[in-house]
Amino acid sequence: MTTTAFPSGTALVLVDLQHWIVSRPVAPHSGAAVVRAAARLKAAFEAAGRPVVLVRHARLDGTDGGPDSHFNRFAEEVAARPGNEVVTKYTISAFAGTDLDALLRRLGATALVVAGIATEYGVGETVRGAVALGHPVTVVEDAVSALSAPAHTAALAALRGLGVTVTSTDELIGPAD
């Protein structure tokens, strides 16, 4: 992995990379491929001393087994480590009904890099929320995926229309070693 110098105000936000979500059929990248790319991003941000926020989707009524159930745990490759922040959301957007914006501001985040599943749902709505709150956002195309390849392409086009930068893992942090 290339050593990357992220601007000091850049935070990584990983959306919904829980077992039950990454095991679903998604396109154009498999859940496993998204997790691999997200793990590379996470390692680069941690090595650079930049904030990493993992967002988990949960059900208010607990019918999903709670945050400690196997299905709700983050994929091992991106599991929270000391120093990472975890936000639990109960809607599609990680900003709706959570303290994510306040947390990012406390962390000094002035720009976000976002990855996760699904491009047209949790990722897209979280990015829209970030843009509405004034956060510049970069979405990492190969570290997100959707329920279909056309939905992925359409979601990224819509986000670009909001001024979101779309890039690849290799473009952002360099090729894997």
Image (cartoon, helix red, strand yellow):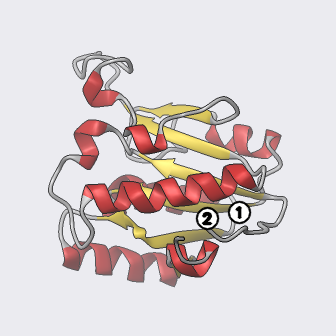
Q: Can residue 101 be seen in this view?
A: yes
The residues bearing labels 1 and 2 have C-alpha atoms spaced at a distance of 5 Å
Q: Position of residue 158 (x, y in %)?
A: 41, 79
Query: Residue 82 or 90: which is nearer the viewer?
Result: 82
Amino acid residing under circle 1: Gly
In the current view of this chain or complex, which residue is farthest to the front? 177
Q: Say few, some or many: other residues with alpha carbon within 10 Å of mark 1 (under 14 / 14 to 19 / 20 or more).
A: few
The residue indicated by pointer 1 is 134
Q: Is residue 22 left or right of residue 148?
A: right
Q: Which mark is residue 16?
A: none
User: Quadrant of the image for the N terminus?
Assistant: bottom right
Residue that appears at 43% across and 36% down? 56
The residue indicated by pointer 2 is 131
Q: Say few, some or many: other residues with alpha carbon within 10 Å of mark 2 (under 14 / 14 to 19 / 20 or more).
A: some
Where 152 sits versus 16, above or below?
below
Q: Which quadrant of the figure has residue 77?
A: top left
Amino acid residing under circle 2: Val
Circles 1 and 2 in contact, beta carbons < 8 Å: yes
